[in-house]
């Protein structure tokens, strides 16, 4: 995403930066589509051996990623920063990781919080909701996978559209809108799946995924501007991975909440809304100009 943003024309940074984000939707589409196909073999076959097939096929994508990365050149902005650093080679400078932790830790934490709902909320939808639909509401594995495939189509189609809106109306405005939409859908998505209809299941997964897409399409581009070139890759990666660490715990956490409340979904909806609220507060609290200035000193 950072490569795309740094190579993009000034007025189309969100749009260019959204294409790697579409990769999430494509990956989700391929995975749910593959599981939908193997689920047709039956539940016993799926849990017994067929689940291994999609995982084995995913190894091919590792090779694709390596080929793409080896063929990419550094961006002009990064090269300019590296040349400036070489000119000051006599000055002792901290590594980017140390610079972020020491001088830009507030930006790192706020960025991590801003990413939280787009990562943690995503896992709640694709992991918890699918499991909840099958184990508690009686949907089949194939029906749950089909709803996930539909949600993936929403990501693929709407990500570039949301990014175009961000380029036109502002990164912060569109990203914040997407984050706040998570608050709007937190309870309705459970009411919809509670209808026990396939249509309700599709809406229960597609609506929160639409909210996630609106925010996720531009948040990477937005947060990358909070860090100066020398620490940008490290700062952005640390922020996303910190949110990812917390986000991967979200399904287990909400599953525990669900069980502790006597198999009741309202606490899960509250937790989903709380993650969105944290992300909104962090996004509003970060002053991008002050953050970039702080990172510049660190670099």
Image (cartoon, rainbow, N blue to C red):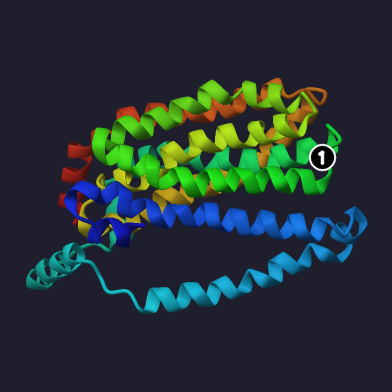
In front: 119, or 278? Answer: 119
x and y, in percent, of residue 95 in the image: 28, 63
- 100 vs 228, nearest the viewer: 228
Q: Position of residue 125 (x, y in %)?
A: 63, 38
In the image, residue 52 above or below residue 247 = below
In the image, residue 293 sits, relative to residue 268, either above or below, namely below
Q: Is residue 167 above or below residue 267?
A: below
- Seen at 7% across and 71% down, the residue is 87
- Residue at the left extreme? 87
Give the class, few, some or many, for how many residues have Cα within 10 Å of label 1's Cα (few <14, many ≥20).
some
Above or below for 289 versus 240: above
Q: Could you tell whether 168 is left or right of 187 in the image?
A: left
- The residue pinned by badge 1 equals 134
Q: Residue at position x 84%, y 56% from top?
A: 40
Q: Is residue 218 left or right of residue 252?
A: left
Image location of residue 253, percent across then percent down: 67, 36
* Secondary structure at numbered mark 1: helix
The answer, for residue 117, to whether it is visible in the render is: no
- Residue lying at 60% horizontally and 27% vertically, measured from the top left: 271
Q: Is residue 109 visible?
A: yes
Hey, which quadrant is residue 207 in on the image? top right
């Amino acid at each position: 995403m950072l490569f795309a943003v740094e190579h993009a024309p000034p007025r189309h940074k969100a749009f260019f930066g959204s294409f790697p984000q579409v990769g999430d939707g494509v990956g989700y589409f391929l995975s749910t589509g593959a599981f939908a196909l193997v689920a047709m073999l039956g539940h016993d076959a799926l849990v017994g051996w067929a689940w291994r097939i999609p995982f084995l096929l995913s190894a091919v994508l590792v090779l694709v990623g390596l080929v793409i990365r080896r063929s990419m050149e550094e961006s002009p902005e990064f090269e300019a920063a590296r040349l400036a650093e070489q000119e000051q080679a006599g000055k002792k400078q901290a590594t980017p990781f140390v610079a972020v932790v020491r001088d830009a830790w507030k930006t790192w934490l706020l960025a991590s919080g801003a990413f939280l709902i787009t990562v943690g909320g995503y896992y709640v939808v694709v992991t918890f909701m699918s499991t909840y639909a099958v184990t508690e509401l009686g949907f089949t594995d194939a029906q749950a996978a089909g709803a996930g495939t539909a949600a993936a189509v929403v990501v693929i189609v709407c990500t570039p559209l949301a990014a175009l809106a961000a380029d036109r109306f502002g990164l912060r405005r569109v990203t914040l809108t997407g984050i706040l939409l998570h608050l709007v859908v937190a309870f309705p998505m459970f009411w919809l799946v509670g209808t026990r209809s396939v249509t309700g299941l599709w809406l229960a997964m597609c609506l929160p995924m639409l909210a996630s897409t609106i925010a996720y399409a531009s948040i990477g581009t937005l947060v990358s501007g909070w860090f100066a070139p020398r620490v940008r890759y490290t700062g952005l990666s640390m922020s996303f991975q910190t949110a990812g660490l917390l986000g991967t715990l979200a399904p287990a956490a909400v599953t525990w909440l669900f069980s502790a409340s006597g198999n009741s979904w309202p606490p899960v909806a509250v937790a989903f809304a709380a993650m969105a609220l944290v992300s909104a507060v962090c996004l509003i609290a970060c002053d991008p100009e002050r953050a970039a200035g702080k990172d510049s000193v660190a670099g």
